[in-house]
Image: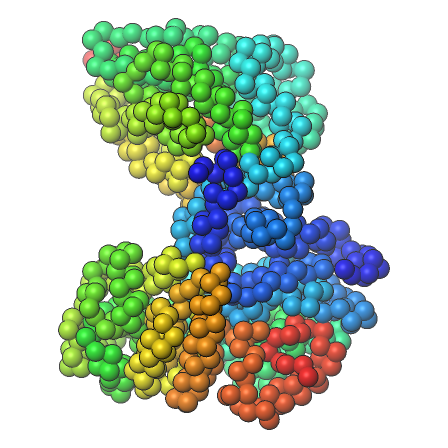
Amino acid sequence: MLAHEILQELVQVLGRENVLTEQEDLLTYAYDATAAMKHHTPDVVVSPLSTEQVAEVVKIAMRYHVPIYPRGSGTNLSGGTIPTEGGIVLSMLNLNKILEVDQDNLTATVQPGVIIQALNNEAAKLGLLYPPDPGTVTTATMGGSVSECSGGLRGLKYGVTKHYIMGLQLVLANGEVIRWGGKTVKNVTGYDLVALFTGAEGTLGIITEIIVKLIPAPEARKSILAVFDDVDKAGKAIAAIIRNKVIPATLEIMDNVTIQTVENFVHAGLPLDAEAVLLCEVDGYQEVVEREAVLVERILNEEGAVQVKIAKDDQERDLLWLARRSALPALAQKRPTTVLEDATVPRSKIPDMLKAIRRIATKHNLQIATFGHAGDGNLHPTILTDERDLEEMKRVHLAVDEIFQVAIALGGTLSGEHGIGIAKMKYLAWEFGEAGVAALRHIKEALDPDYILNPGKLVRRD
Amino acid sequence: MSVYNSLDSITEELHKCMKCGNCMAVCPIYKETRQEVAVARGKISLVEYLLSGEITMTEGMADRFSLCTTCMACNTNCPCGVRFDKIILAARAEAVRKKGLHPVKKIAFTALKMQRVFDFGMKAGSIFQGVALKNIPDRHSKLARMRVDIGIGKEKVFPMLSKKTLRSELPEVITVKNPKMRVGFFTGCMINYFYTDIGRAVVEVLTENDIEVVIPRFQACCGIPASVNGDVGSARTLAKRNLRAFERMGADALVVACSSGGTAWKHVFGELLENDPELKALADKWAKKSYDISEFLIHQVPFKKDGLGRVARKVTYHDPCHLNRGQGISKEPREILKSIPGVELIEMKEAGRCCGMAGSFSLVHPELSVQISDHKTADIQTTNTDTVATGCPACRLQLQSGLENARLDGEVLHTIQILAESYRVGKEELRRPK
């Protein structure tokens, strides 16, 4: 429980209607989309309407040493928004305006509560595109996806969120408001704080305005699906496509477990004994797309695909994508708990990673389906389990540990796009050693010495 | 075990939810409030905490459970196939078991059960409604607004109570020459008391297609207002009365022109009466031969196309949630509209988005209801049509109210009214000398 005067001050700043204090409301901010995670109820939920109000809330929190947990839609998969130490949940959803779409500078300026899809709808009216497209594109906020540096299906060709963030307005832990970066392509003034705050998971400051880069929307696209009877062949095909200087917008893979589950779920026509399916989409100018699609088809055949299909029109394209789109829903309906990881390896190591995951699944007697963004090495080993089964959950945790060990051993990383949050904090030293963990902590303490902002996430407090 | 009997009935449904939050993309209430408790994921969590014993049922909890229009948009968008409509009904029934029914609702649902008292009240209402309601002049149908705000706002436009109820206006059996079948017509309250024009159109179209119509005098309210608010006892009483009334009169099929009524006959009666083998069998028997009027005309009759006269209307169609997602009927009304000469069907954006009426929801949350309605009105406006067709009298009320408040001149009709109009014009065209 927060002291009465803290609540009073919050109400004074935000107005009664933007301060939630009743148990029935608070309980619904105790979790996010992360599976098998302990929930924690905040003491209060506030919804500011302006940067000034955010700054005032931070000052109050600082004065009373109350933690602040910034939150967008709460769709992250790392426990990033769970208020582990109670305190204030700062809901950014009422800061939801698209302030500008600038056609001349190819930028958009948005508030953090804007839903990604809403920005894309506005950009599309001008023939523009904001490329990052996490699976939660219709629900996640810009603030959340910048803070988590979301990736998505178009990473291979277009990169991820951090490649599109040009400027930020931030409220620091001391309540000061700063602006960094802007609409210029070039900017080397000072440290690159825009890069630092992107993916900082709300632990260094609170984002209150975002300037993003937009690109001209591609004119055409073409999808190709290939079936393989061998994971290694699929892996070689991925490398061969890239080696031939084709950079597809999307290059996705599904393993045998995923294929079987999906096929039973949507009957998309995939052979049940296939060891891997690759789904590739090239986009750009019409002429280029035609050329690349034919090239990709040839490469896939040369690399030993047992079946290659090119979608002739949008209807066929949707059919090819049905299987991939249905992967997570299909898997999620199989067991009550779906632990979705995002260990990422260099793309040349995809076959090794797939085989290692299968080995781990057998060893711990678990159902693990793997699908994901093969083109950028970002796989989603998905463990199907039931969090009520404590014995099985023990094996799940062991398997997760081993998946991370393998990913790092293959030259990869703990997290490609979901972030560290609470879920992966304990593994950080595996990737960059105790010295690296200390470096993270020094940065955190320089900007937020009292651990007011999203404490308990990303940076371990010793 | 039905959702009306115990919270345990939905345990598996709850476990399916992986908290991904996809429901946020489509929930009409969440879109307005942007508070987690408004969306399915939030209320699912509350029910989970209840079941785990972390919290107990409070009146505040019951209030939160009232924040759902049961539009089922989240069901459709859920990657895990969670049936949130079941969860919310179970949660509300639990709230009533633990905390009792809201006093106003208690009075209302008791009145629904006492048909004659209710009829008398409505009759008196039709005489005295001028005291509370102020007529809006020059409208397509008789509309009125509250003179004083009694807690539901003055925004809402109401249809005037009909001088005569539909069931007292029409004989119990409407015969035709050489009937090809005998159909029972379940009118529902809104059509019986307010929108008798829809009821007359149903009878007109059915008889035009050589179908004998039976309107059992002793039919009652469908009970949906009670069951969705957790008053399972009242809903059960009404279900029994309806089943007996129709069983006594007998019919080859049963038609409804109201999405709640259709849901009741097809799904809810059986669930309510699952513990009574005899009545359950009766409910199942009638469920199999219950049809929405548009579904009936397309798949069972099929309705005759010759004799359709020209109706010059630009029409946009609003999908009622419980007809579209609830019963899977969205093509049929459009097919009817497209078959009418002169009708130009222009689709609005998100025709399947909830209008915000949701029965008593609009009374308990008048402001939210109007906010949701405003989006619908805006979408209607961009179609530049002169008529909005829909398949539910409650939606009709909400849509008309929205147009009225935006000072738009569109007319809102049930699809069946436009079909009836076409038959009528067809006959006139025949009479006219060539």
Rendered image coloring scheme: rainbow
Which residue does the image show at 31% across and 81% down from the upper left?
A355
Q: Furthest residue to the right?
A: A5
| Relative to B371, residue A21 above or below | below
Q: In the image, B300: left or right of A52?
A: left
Which of the two residues, A389 or B336, is positioned nearer the viewer here?
Answer: A389
Residue A213 visible to the viewer: no
Q: In the image, A457: left or right of A376?
A: right
Q: Residue A160: give x, y in percent of width and height.
A: 45, 76
* Quarter of the N terminus of chain B within the rendering: top left
Which residue does the image show at 19% across and 75% down from the upper left?
A229
Q: Residue B385: give x, y in percent of width and height.
A: 41, 35
Count of numbered marks: 0
Which residue does the image show at 25% across and 60% down from the upper left?
A263
* Quarter of the C terminus of chain B within the rendering: top left
Q: Residue B373: give x, y in percent of width and height.
A: 54, 39
| Relative to A195, residue B325 above or below | above
Q: In the image, B358: left or right of B266?
A: right
Q: Quadrant of residue B160?
A: top right
Which of the two residues, A445 or A166, is positioned nearer the viewer here?
Answer: A445
| Relative to B307, residue A379 above or below | below
| Relative to B168, residue B143 above or below | below
